[in-house]
């Protein structure tokens, strides 16, 4: 059994967990009881061991697939020798409240309707808990099938039969007949899900959410689709954004660069907040900011660069019983990068806080005092090395991107103190540290012989994250040093049309990764700010052609366009939105930050008193 291309999978979400559906109609990835949970269907990572939920129309090895407009409801069309049928696959959702704007129904729904002739439908459900390490049996109770050892129940209006670990059915559907299978992962003691109205309620909920955005500018369809992906990757209980729904999808086929991305990286913070507010999803922006600040309040310095969707840290381990996608081992869960020191994290958090204050004026005194502590930390520690934004597993170094984002932390802290009229903040020391750091980066982070900014002090290696220098306001994009850096990145890091790697350095791992799509889209934004709009548009169009058949992107691409890495990737879709909005504005500054500053005037905040003396 071969592995389908990574970006050929359909993505379903109820904002509590997700499912990936292969082109031949099999659910090959599904974690319970939430995104970070046990993958009871993990055929994505092992064709023999991983569990799966297959639904097949006889004579149709693959279906024509698309999404119903402005939803995450998959529509499939089957044309077989005996007739024609349409399918609907979705994770049910409904409207929520202010605390949870979208409410997960916690049921995977698979429907097939025969439209013409007679079609033969085959169903086989084989969950394997423990990421495929275990097996389960089935017990029928009150008309539903209960899996042993895993929180799954199955109800259907067709005759299911238990055959050891498998639950199967085979039935002929005449024209007009619909078969519905409900896979419930919610409360076992609760009532069985009622299939009536689930499809309509799910479509209406997604469309109501999508309809909040009135963006109709450049690449509007791709922007709206990317926003849906981001919403599908946002955890309903906390507002946390997953980097991706999967673990261990390889950055090189057959290689060892296989990481777990089912966590929240703070490096997404400001970009996510900007995108959500700009596209009309202010409530989700507020929830994410509150989640972020709660993390800051509970963690001591240094802040972990990533956390789980419930705010907890994670431990990395290997699963030797899985062969991996296309024999790419090891398969890992958890992520050791949570233990690294990444000072760029502070810049992303303070940038998000400034954006939030500019847009809402709602930061509280307690929240600002918490953020002020982090600015003090960076004013004190900016001369130290760290592990860098790309989480290279080696000794700490003076990574230039980390220095730039530390500058962002100090700069945004100064601006927030001014907005909040906080006379207790150590603004003079922050300003001195910011200016000293800026001068040091220009002196040690730019290599005259190489003709560009570099990965770290004392080397000439390239780093595509340096494309963010103009996007955060550290230097104008048309500064000669920045223009030279953009040109060198395009020359030295390119592996295909519009495709660039994230760095050029020995990272201690065998093999090499593909092009990092976040960086490719950030190159678009950098070119716009540099005044090269036509080149930026051409690059965006080339990247658009690399989207998967359903419009989603993975983390990386090989030079031949093969999708690599975890999927669907929030980083990529965030950078796509940023690039499209920059092209739409085509101004001389990053459109999202400019919009935030001008969206509404922010009055001076109430004075924030210092904490009481100890």
Image: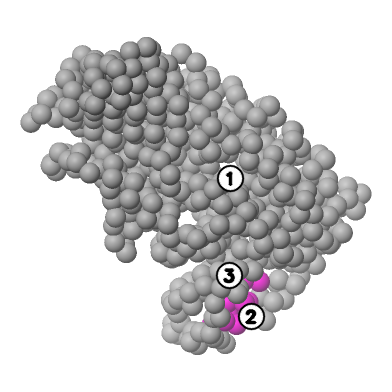
Quadrant showing the C terminus: bottom left
Residue identifier under label 3: 596
Q: Position of residue 405 (x, y in %)?
A: 66, 60
Disc number placed over residue 427 in the picture, else none: 2
Answer above or below: position of 431 versus 521. Answer: below
Per the image, the residue denoted by label 1 is 572
Label 1, secondary structure: give it: helix
| Total numbered badges shown on the rendered structure | 3
| Residue shown at the point (45%, 42%) measured from the top left | 262
Measured Cα–Cα span from mark 3 to mark 2: 23 Å
- Residue 112 located left or right of residue 23: left
Mark 2 Cα shell of 10 Å, populated few (<14), some (14-19), many (≥20) = many
**Mark 1, residues whose alpha carbon is within 10 Å: few (<14), some, or many (≥20)?**
many
Label 3, secondary structure: give it.
helix
Span highlighted in magenta in the image: 409-420
Instruction: State the residue in front, 316 or 580.
Output: 580
Q: Main secondary structure of the magenta part?
A: helix
Q: Are marks 3 and 2 in contact (CB under 8 Å)?
A: no
Q: Is residue 414 magenta?
A: yes
């Amino acid at each position: 059994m071969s592995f389908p291309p990574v970006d050929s999978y359909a993505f379903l979400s109820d904002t509590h967990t997700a499912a990936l559906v292969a082109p031949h109609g099999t659910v090959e990835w599904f974690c319970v009881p939430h995104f970070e949970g046990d993958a009871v269907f993990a055929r994505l990572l092992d064709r023999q061991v991983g569990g799966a939920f297959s639904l097949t129309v006889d004579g149709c090895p693959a279906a024509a697939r698309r999404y119903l407009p402005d939803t995450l409801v998959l529509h499939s069309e089957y044309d077989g020798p005996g007739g024609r049928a349409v399918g609907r696959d979705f994770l049910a959702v409904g409207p929520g409240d202010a605390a949870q704007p979208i409410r997960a129904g916690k049921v995977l729904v698979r429907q097939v309707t025969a439209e013409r002739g007679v079609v033969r439908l085959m169903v086989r459900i084989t969950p394997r808990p423990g990421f495929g390490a275990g097996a389960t049996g089935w017990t029928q109770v009150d008309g539903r099938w209960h899996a042993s050892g895993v929180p799954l129940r199955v109800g259907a209006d067709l005759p299911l039969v238990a055959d050891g670990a498998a639950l199967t059915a085979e039935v002929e559907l005449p024209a007009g007949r619909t078969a519905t299978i409900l896979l419930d992962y919610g409360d076992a003691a609760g009532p069985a899900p009622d299939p009536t109205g689930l499809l309509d309620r799910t479509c209406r909920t997604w469309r109501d959410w999508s309809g909040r955005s009135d963006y109709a500018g450049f690449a509007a369809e791709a922007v709206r689709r990317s926003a849906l992906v981001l919403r599908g990757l946002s955890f309903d209980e906390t507002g946390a954004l997953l980097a991706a729904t999967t673990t261990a999808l390889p950055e090189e086929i057959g290689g060892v660069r296989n990481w777990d991305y089912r966590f929240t990286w703070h490096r997404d913070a400001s970009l996510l907040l900007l995108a959500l507010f700009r596209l009309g999803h202010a409530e989700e922006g507020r929830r994410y900011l509150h989640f972020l600040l709660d993390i800051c309040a509970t963690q001591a310095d240094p802040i972990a660069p990533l956390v789980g969707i419930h705010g907890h840290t994670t431990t990395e381990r290997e699963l030797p019983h899985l062969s991996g996608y296309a024999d790419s081992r090891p398969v890992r869960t958890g992520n050791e990068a949570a233990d690294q020191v990444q000072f760029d994290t502070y810049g992303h958090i303070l940038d998000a806080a400034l954006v939030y204050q500019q847009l809402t004026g709602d930061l509280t005194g307690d929240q600002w005092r918490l953020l002020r502590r982090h600015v003090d930390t960076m004013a004190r520690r900016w001369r130290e090395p760290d592990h860098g934004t790309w989480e290279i597993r080696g000794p700490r170094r003076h990574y230039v991107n980390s220095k730039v984002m530390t500058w962002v932390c100090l700069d945004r802290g100064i601006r927030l103190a001014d907005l909040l009229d906080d006379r207790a903040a150590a603004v003079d020391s922050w300003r001195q540290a910011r200016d000293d750091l800026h001068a040091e980066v220009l002196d040690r982070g730019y290599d005259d012989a190489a003709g560009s900014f570099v990965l770290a002090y004392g080397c000439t290696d390239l780093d595509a994250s340096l494309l963010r220098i103009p996007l955060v306001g550290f230097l104008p994009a048309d500064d000669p040093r920045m223009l030279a850096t953009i040109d060198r990145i395009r020359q030295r890091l390119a592996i295909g049309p519009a495709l660039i790697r994230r760095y050029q350095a020995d990272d201690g791992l065998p093999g090499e990764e593909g092009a990092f799509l976040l960086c490719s889209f950030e190159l678009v934004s950098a070119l716009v700010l540099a005044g090269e709009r036509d080149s930026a548009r051409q690059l965006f169009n080339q990247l658009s052609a690399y989207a998967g058949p359903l419009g989603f992107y993975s983390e990386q691409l090989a030079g031949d366009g093969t999708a690599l890495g975890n999927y669907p990737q929030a980083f990529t879709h965030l950078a796509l939105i940023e690039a499209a909005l920059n092209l739409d504005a085509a101004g001389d500054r990053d459109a999202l930050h400019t919009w935030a500053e001008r969206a509404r005037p922010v009055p001076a905040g109430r004075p924030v008193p210092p904490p009481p003396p100890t």
